[in-house]
Image: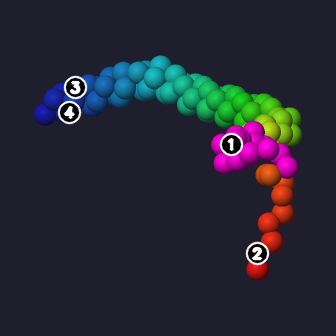
Amino acid sequence: MNRQKAISLLLLLIELAVTLFIAGIVVPGLIRSDSATKEALAAGSLHTLNIAAITFSYTTENVVFAILGALVGAIAAFAIHLNTAYAGQSPAQVLQVRVVR
């Protein structure tokens, strides 16, 4: 009986040693991959912030041109409307003040 217990204990110690050996190989790789993942996420976030900053700078530079373009477009639309609404009339007739009684 003592010999059987000694073999079981020896097998248990060998299995424990093999398990610790494999864990010693695997765990550092997992720790490195975790830190690499965090670094990749941080780099991605910085890249996103950089794109947002560039987009914002271009947007604020072009706001004046966007407002100017909208104003020119509105004037052109108004001129086209006047041209079609008063077609065939002279400018004097278009500008004539009509008094309503």
Seen from the viewer's position, the closer of residues 41 and 26 is 41
- Label at residue 100: 2
Whether residue 96 is visible to the viewer of this picture, yes or no, is yes
From the top left corner, tell me how far across and down residue 56 is, in percent. 78, 38
User: At 54% across and 25% down in the image, what residue appears?
Assistant: 33
| Span highlighted in magenta in the image | 75-92
Viewed as shown, does residue 46 lie left or right of 7? right
Toward the bottom, the furthest residue is 101
Q: Provide the secondary structure element on which disc 1 rests.
A: loop
From the top left corner, tell me how far across and down residue 7 is, in percent. 22, 26
- Crowding at dot 2, Cα within 10 Å, few <14 / some 14-19 / many 20+, comes out as few
Tell me whether the residue at label 1 lies in contact with that at label 4, contact meaning CB atoms closer than 8 angstroms: no
- Crowding at dot 3, Cα within 10 Å, few <14 / some 14-19 / many 20+, comes out as few
Viewed as shown, does residue 98 lie left or right of 25? right
Quarter of the figure with residue 75: top right
- Crowding at dot 4, Cα within 10 Å, few <14 / some 14-19 / many 20+, comes out as few
For marks 3 and 2, give the CA distance.
119 Å
Q: Provide the secondary structure element on which disc 2 rests.
A: loop
The quadrant in which the N terminus is found is top left
* Residue underneath mark 4: 5
Seen from the viewer's position, the closer of residues 8 and 23 is 23
First in sequence, mark 3 or 2: give its number. Answer: 3
For marks 3 and 4, give the CA distance.
5 Å
Viewed as shown, does residue 50 lie left or right of 38? right
Label 3 sits on what residue type?
Ile
* Residue underneath mark 3: 7
Label 1 sits on what residue type?
Ala
From the top left corner, tell me how far across and down residue 26 is, in percent. 46, 23
* Residue underneath mark 1: 87
Label 4 sits on what residue type?
Lys
Mark 4 or 2, which is nearer the eye? 2
Tell me whether the residue at label 3 lies in contact with that at label 2, contact meaning CB atoms closer than 8 angstroms: no
